Image (cartoon, rainbow, N blue to C red):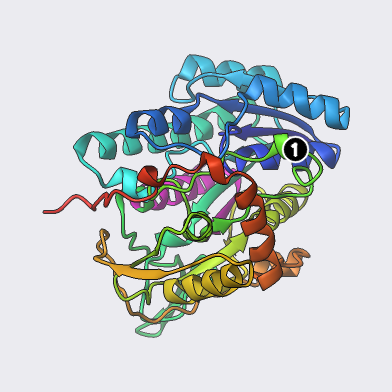
Amino acid sequence: MRVLILGMDGYLGWPTAMALSKEGHEVCGVDNYLRRNICREQDVAPLFPTPNLHERVRLWEAVSGKKIGVYIGDLKEWTFISRVFQEFQPDAVIHYAEQPSAPYSMLNRETAMHTMNNNLTVTANVIFAVKEFCPEAHIIKLGTMGEYGTPNIDIEEGWLDVEYKGRKEKFLYPRQGSSLYHTTKIMDTDMLWFYVRMWGLRVTDLMQGPVYGLFTEESEQDERLLPFFNYDELFGTVINRFAVQAVVGYPLTVYGKGGQTRGYINIKDTMNCVSLSVENPAQKGELRIFNQITETFNVKELADKVKGVGSQLGLEVQIKSIPNPRIEAEEHYYNPKFTGLVDLGLKPNYLTDEVLENMLKAIIKHRKNINKSKIYRGFEWHKK
């Protein structure tokens, strides 16, 4: 298929491009380096220097013999996005092109508006570009399990069957995001569902939990192909942060009681889930939703896991509970369903001691790049 990846420079976008290219799809990617620019503005940095997209695709071609196309530009601009869609004519569109940090979205009015303007405008432009230039294309949008919040009932896979006063109806599962970022993702889902109903679009919405890991099958062959890997509190996911903290002897930053429970997924499984979605497209007029996680943990459990494996490697790992900079429930019920992707053929990679050990060993190789001052600065949710 002809697969267009929006946000190809990111932690997930670049590995996705390589994985689909390796499978034989014709891949083209778009980015405006939003994440890199925000990192510079906020004085945070990835674990290791990451080549720009033009350099990455040249390296990938040298390693694999396969070409990946690149467009650099802002998907908020209709002139640019319409040119991309007209020229490439995708069969599938993978939409990663959003400001992905919940903490960043909560810093102040400026970062909130930046998040809203980017995320909602890009999603709307994607919808209109598909309708106008490739109406049969399959949109695969990366959602987030954070859309659901932490309800006191089981979290179904996107939809909820309701019986009320003798009548039945199927609704999108109620959403209650805990940050503005998550709220923009809820708006994405609502917007997509509206245009699925209006225009008969075919859409898969992947409600993904926090991702961890450095290596996919492609980057295991050549570390120059590794993704943009953050370890700071703005862009670094919790397992990735803890692993870096463990390597440099920085106490693992457990927010509050550490009872916050979420669903997690290995970066290799993200690649597999997206590939399965591409190769098994939604039907015309269907909004298909998958909960893209493989297992659940609370933060304290994750810290204990990292400490245990780190200690076996001779690292001095400490755990420190700190005041929670976020506004969230620290103890709660959490029971999400996640069978759809398994039914399509996903074979999960679980968070084993071996997986953590390999992560820690890889990070140790780059230990000299870690700047402790960039790990944690106490960015707080914007108070009332």
* Near-viewer residue (336 or 133): 336
Which quadrant of the figure has residue 76? Answer: top left
In the picture, the quarter occupied by the N terminus is top right
Looking at the magenta stretch, what is its main secondary structure?
helix
Task: Check disc 1 and report the residue beneath it.
Answer: 18
Callout 1 secondary element: helix
Residue at 57% over, 19% down? 72
On screen, residue 120 versus residue 267, left or right, reads: left
Q: Quadrant of the C terminus?
A: bottom left
Relative depth, front residue between 379 and 188: 379
For the residue carrying disc 1, how many other residues have a C-alpha within 10 Å: few (<14), some (14-19), or many (20+)?
many
- Furthest-left residue in view? 384
The region drawn magenta spans: 183-209
Q: Is residue 360 visible?
A: yes
Magenta segment: does it hold 187? yes
x%, y% of residue 241? 47, 55
